[in-house]
Amino acid sequence: MEGRAAALGAGTVLNALATGTGAAFGIDVETRATVELDPAADGVAGEIAEDADADTDLIERCVALATERWGGGEGGTVRTDSDVPLAAGLKSSSAAANATVLATCDALGLAVGDDPDDPAVDVTRLEACRLGVRAAREAGVTVTGAFDDATASMLGGVTVTDNDADELRVRETVDWEVLIWTPPERAYSADADVARCEAVAPMADLVADLALDGRYGEAMTVNGLAFSAALGFDADPAVEAMPHTTAVSLSGTGPSVVAVADPADPETDLDAVADAWGDRLGTLRRTTTRNDGAAVE
Ligand SMILES: Nc1ncnc2c1ncn2[C@@H]1O[C@H](COP(=O)(O)OP(=O)(O)O)[C@@H](O)[C@H]1O
Ligand SMILES: O=C(O)C1=C[C@@H](OP(=O)(O)O)[C@@H](O)[C@H](O)C1
């Protein structure tokens, strides 16, 4: 009983740590999971290809919760390999959880889809996403549950969510070119200074209003300024990028900064941003948004 799936990394439009309302968008950077189920196995053993010392609790819980819910409580193994850097603000935890839950469904021989009324669909992607969020809460890798990041990773496009209720408020497609700067340091969401984020709640409310109005670019840029200040990140990379982009923001609790460009806007120029960011330590990555989301492979 082997199953495989892949899920997306994502960038932030609105960090949910201030108010519980968040927004994010899927990008073309993937995490893949392979799950091998064995009814005789005692528990689940996880492995992360890029980092033998990283914490595998999240993906082990994802398999265990999924087999409890949709299978017969099988144990087994789970292995992820990922292009999403761990704890860099690009939603590695959401991508790993989503890929693992879908791979477990695949190993159980279940059909995954989006229409809950379709008799051919055993598990919807939104149900799978909520199970991954539950596992993330239990593993202690999240503050709010990060349903915003989880839905962007699972469904693709841009999503706006209420993370207190795990409710999807908006999902829309978005087509942007993307440039990401990831500094060498890491920032685990669970260690973020929540009180400092709550202090900028009036700005987060403004960002939510812009996002709910479909003004995702302006929302994202305001988010970046507010949360860079709250979390103590330098806003210079965002200021350098602003003249050449549709939007730019610190992603999640950092440290990555994500710049996006609407290809239909001749004023945007991500090459100019790459030049401006070129001397900074860390890595630069060019990609695009994705609107298809996670899938069984
Ligand atoms: N590829 C992966 N495979 C398994 N677990 C992962 C993977 N990437 C991240 N995680 C889990 O997510 C945690 C990091 O979560 P978090 O700090 O929220 O980072 P991010 O902002 O990238 O989601 C890790 O400690 C690990 O438990
Ligand atoms: O743990 C959480 O509840 C969250 C973590 C942040 O993302 P990162 O995990 O990318 O830092 C933030 O953007 C998100 O809205 C909520």
Image: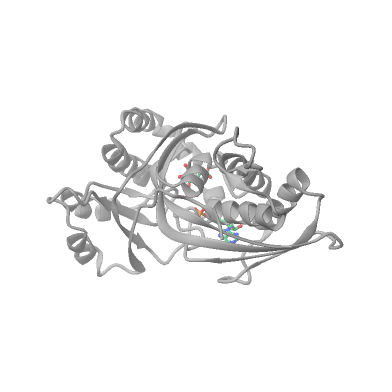
Residue extending farthest to the left is 267
Q: Quadrant of the C terminus?
A: bottom right
* Residue at figure coordinates x 34%, y 27% from the top left: 209
Residue 71, x across and y down, in percent: 77, 49
Q: Quadrant of the N terminus?
A: bottom right
Residue 29, x across and y down, in percent: 43, 60
107 left or right of 185?
Answer: right
Residue 111, x across and y down, in percent: 64, 48
Q: Quadrant of residue 49?
A: bottom right
Residue 226, x across and y down, in percent: 34, 40
Position of 207 relative to 234 (above/below): above
Q: How many marks?
A: 0
Q: Nearer the viewer, residue 187 or 46?
A: 46
* Residue at figure coordinates x 74%, y 45% from the top left: 70
Task: Report whether residue 238 is seen.
Answer: yes
* Residue at figure coordinates x 60%, y 36% from the top left: 118
* Residue at figure coordinates x 87%, y 62% from the top left: 40
Q: Quadrant of residue 220?
A: top left
Task: Report whether residue 44 is seen.
Answer: no
What's the colour scheme? one colour
Q: Nearer the viewer, residue 225 or 104?
A: 104
Position of 53 relative to 260 (above/below): below
Position of 127 relative to 104 (above/below): above
